[in-house]
Amino acid sequence: MIPGPIEFTPDVLRAMGMPTTSHVAPNFIEIFGQALEDLRNVFLAPSGQPFVVPGSGTLAMDMAAANLVEPRDHALVVNTGYFSDRFAKILERYGAIVTHVHARTVGDAPPLGEVESALQSIKPKLMTITHVDTSTAVATNVRELAALGRKHEALVIVDGVCATAGEEMRQDEWGIDLALTASQKALGVPPGLALVVAGPRAMETFKKRKKPVGNFYADWTEWLPIMHAYEGRKPSYFATPAVNLMWALYVSLKGILAEGMEVRFARHKKLSDAFKAAMGALTLKQVPIRPENYATTLSGLYYPEGVDKGVLKYIDEAGVIVAGGLHPAIREQYFRVGHMGAVTGNDVIATVAAIESGLARVGYKFEKGSGIVAAQRGLA
Ligand code: PMP
C-alpha cells in the first residue's frame, strides 16, 4: 500500500512474463495501436496525441518540457512540493524562466487568486500543475487551475504521475494541454513506461518551434511518426519499445476501461474516504490541511502523539507495507499510504487492521477496532 510501484493484478503480471516478440510482430503492432487508442479514453482526451516510451515519469516530464519549451520562455509552476520543484528544474534545463507560486504551508495548495495574479503579470507560455503531490497527498484543483491557465493563454501541463487513472481528470473537458503519467501507479503497470497525452494546442506549439528540440531521445519529431505508425497498424522503429511492458499496459488499460472511468474515480474516492475516516477514528491527522485537497489515490498521516516511524516496522509485520515521510520539512512526522489501482475494500480493511496492530504494539492508547468500524461504515 505504498504510493507506487503499486500491487499489480495477475493478468498484468502474466503479460510481463510472456515470450517477448519483435517490436514489429503483427500482434505487437496491434496491441500497441489499441493501447494508444485506449489511453485517449483513460485520459478522457479524444483529441489528444498519446506518446508511450520506455522510461519513468521523470522522462514524461522531460518530454513535455523538451518539446514545448524554448529558451527564455516564461513558465509558471504551481508548486505543491517535491515533484513541482523537479518540474521547475527540468523546465530550466531547457532555458525556461520559471516563476513559482508556492503553497503557504506544507499540506496546503497555492491559492487560486495568487496563481491568477502570477498568470496576469508573467503571461507565461506554460504552467505546470502537480495533480497529486506524492510527498504530501495534496491534490490540486486541476479543473479550476486549468481554467485559469486557459483564460490567460498559458499551455496547461499536468503531472498526473500519482493521479492519472485514479483521481478524477478530464483532459479535454478541463482544457488540459498536456497530461503525463508513469506506468507504476494508478495505471497499474510495473515501472518502465513514460506516458504523455498532448492536446492540439500543445502539438501546435511544438510544430511552430523555432529551435530544434534539445533532447534526442524525447524529441516528438522522432516519436510522432512512430505513434502514428502503430495507430495505423504499420511497423516502424525509432527506439525499441518495452515490448512486455506494452503488453502489460494493453491488458491494464482494458481492465481500467472495463471498469469504466466514472466507476473507477468513484471507487478511488470511496476507498480513500473510508480509509481517511478510519484514520480519523484513530485520531491520526491528515497532512493536507483542507478536505478539498485530499487526494483519493494516497493519504499522508501524521503520527499521533508519542509515536514515531518505529511503528512502520510493526505495520509491516502485520503484513502491510506503507511508506515513510518524503517531504523534507516534515519527513520524520508522518507516513504515507497509497490506495490506488486495483485496491479493494478488503485491502483498506487489512491496512487499517495492520495500522491498529502497529499502534497497539508501540503502546499508543486508542479504542481498538474503532478504525475498522469507521472503515466499514465508509465502505458500506
Ligand atoms: N511526479 C510525481 C507526482 C511523482 O509522484 C513521481 C514519482 N513518485 C514523479 C513525478 C517521477 O516519476 P518517476 O519516479 O517514475 O520518474
Image: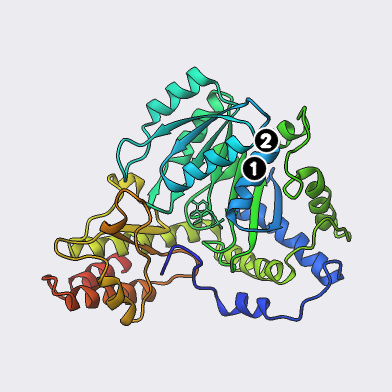
Q: Tell which of 260 and 189 is nearer to you.
A: 189
Residue 164 in picture, x, y percent from top left: 53, 54
Q: Determine the residue located farthest toward the top in the rendered image.
A: 121
Disc 2 marks a residue whose amino acid type is Leu
Mark 1, residue position = 64
Asked whether the residues under the numbered discs 1 and 2 touch, taking CB atoms below 8 Å apart as contact, a structural biologist would say yes
Under tag 2, what secondary structure?
helix
Which quadrant of the figure contains the C terminus? bottom left
Q: In this orientation, does residue 330 appear?
A: yes
Where does the image place residue 306, in percent across and percent down from the top left?
Answer: 14, 64
The N terminus lies in quadrant: bottom left
Residue at the image point whose x is 65% and y is 66% from the top: 249
Using residue 332 as the reference point, say whether residue 102 is left or right of it. right
Q: Residue at x 78, y 35 (%)?
A: 212
- Name the residue that disc number 2 marks: 68
Q: Nearer the viewer, residue 129 or 259?
A: 129
